[in-house]
Amino acid sequence: MEALVMAGQLILGLTILVGIHELGHMLTAKWFGMRVEKYAIGFPPKLVSKQVGETEYMIGMIPLGGFVKISGMIDESLDTATLNQEPEPWEFRAKPAWQRLIVMMGGIIFNVITGIIIFAALTYLYGESYLLAKDVQYGIETNEVGEQMGLRDGDKIVAVNGKPLVEFQDVYSPDVLLGKNGSYTVERNGQQLQVPVPTNLIDKLADGDKVGFIMAREPFAVEAVKAKSPASAAGLQPGDRITQVGNQPVQFFHDFQKTLQANKGKEIALQVDRGGKPVTLKTKVDEDGTIGFYPKLLLPRATREYSLVEAIPEGAEKAFSVITTNIKGFAKIFRAEVSPSKALSGPIGIAQIFGGNFSWINFWAITAMLSMVLAFMNFLPIPALDGGHVMFLTYEIISGRKPSDKFLENAQKVGMVLLLGLMGFAIFNDFFKLLFN
């Protein structure tokens, strides 16, 4: 069921984003009087289609993409049958370079606007919930990656890159994870220590939990119990506080998770505080190391509210921070500080980001992030991507010379080979990580 939820969210999110991206190309093309032959979400074989005027609107069976076919444009279809004839006034190639440039930027611009709108709407509707560093009174939990860095369970992080830590989420800031010479200042046994951040930290985190290397130690209670789960069969109830697993006391949720992982497939006894009264329950841990409940973390959260006027620039800042993070990530790859096999993900990796539990807030937040990633990736100067077309059109505008149709056709072929190779690598990499990590 979780796999279906992941796949459903992936298909819905990409359908929305691809539809908006291609809509940007189509509307700008029609604006300048270009003939749009086809607007497609998904790739053939065709599921449904409808002809409206000069344009066929189609939904394809393969949902991971889409395209717009503009007359007289050398694109991924490589339809060059009419290029030896004189251009018609409605064709892409007959229009001034600046108009063609806007059409090629249309999809990117629409994706950026979409990301900003979604981030701004989420900020306005829900504000920002955050954990103040001063409220992380029990310190942190860490994993093997954190321990290799020099972090220890119970450490209190007081500064990041030399700046006092105010909001706990800033321990995951791209400035420290993707920057150079990053460091955490921790308080341990009454002393302050500097813990340097290795330049290949992201590479190490790609093998495991990207956030779990630093987590606040949090007491917890049961928020809700999943139907037909081991926890439900055992009689666990909302509001219960689990105090002991077998003979091992547990205070923090992270410790409880580790205990369950060590008892996969086994039956365990839970000691529960229910309204001040002790209750003993027996339950089975499933093969994933869970018993089936949603936790309520008990450290106090603050909420930052935004007016509509405040939410718009805040949403824009969040949107563009996705792009700057991607730029820093690419820089890490080019400096050989991060392995491409660990940094790149295909459809399976993206589906895992959505997760197996559906939440509209989570769905739209991830969709907004992917909208900005799609804009960034499409802007890369690779033939067959929008950025490749933008590169050649910019050259034409500056030099006054248009590359030949034959050159553009061959560049498109090279770009398609590169993209198909990259896509194949990403999909293979997804399966490899799924099977061996």
Image (cartoon, rainbow, N blue to C red):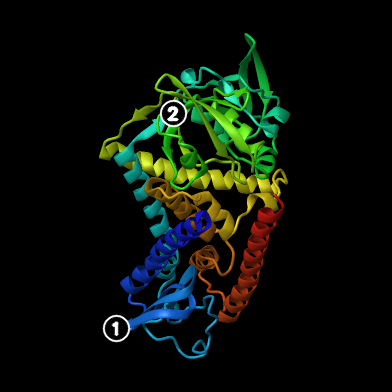
**Residue furthest toward the top?**
190
* Count of numbered circles in the view: 2
Q: Is residue 350 left or right of residue 193?
A: left
Which mark's residue is nearer the viewer, 2 or 1? Answer: 2
In this view, the residue in front, 159 or 403, is 159
Measured in 3D between alpha carbons, the distance from the residue under mark 2 to the one under mark 1, in whole angstroms, is 62 Å
Q: Quadrant of residue 185?
A: top right
Graded by Cα atoms within 10 Å as few (under 14), some (14 to 19) or many (20 or more), the crowding at tag 1 reads few
Secondary structure state at the residue bearing disc 1: loop
List the residue tagged with mark 1: 53
The vertical placement of 217 against 413, above or below, is: above
In this view, the residue in front, 169 or 147, is 147
What amino acid is found at the position of numbered circle 2 in the picture? Asp
Percent position of residue 418, x then y? 65, 67
Sequence-first tag of 2 and 1: 1
In this view, the residue in front, 43 or 208, is 208
The vertical placement of 71 against 117, above or below, is: below
What amino acid is found at the position of numbered circle 1 in the picture? Gly
Q: Is residue 16 left or right of residue 173?
A: left
Percent position of residue 178, x then y? 61, 38
Q: Residue at x 40, y 33 (%)?
A: 238
Q: Is residue 27 left or right of residue 92?
A: left
Percent position of residue 85, x then y? 48, 91
Q: Quadrant of residue 270?
A: top right
Q: Residue at x 44, y 28 (%)?
A: 240
Secondary structure state at the residue bearing disc 2: loop
Residue 119 in sight in this render: yes
Percent position of residue 186, x then y? 61, 18
Residue 37 in sight in this render: no
Graded by Cα atoms within 10 Å as few (under 14), some (14 to 19) or many (20 or more), the crowding at tag 2 reads many
Residue 240 shows which numbered tag? Answer: 2
The vertical placement of 271 against 204, above or below, is: above
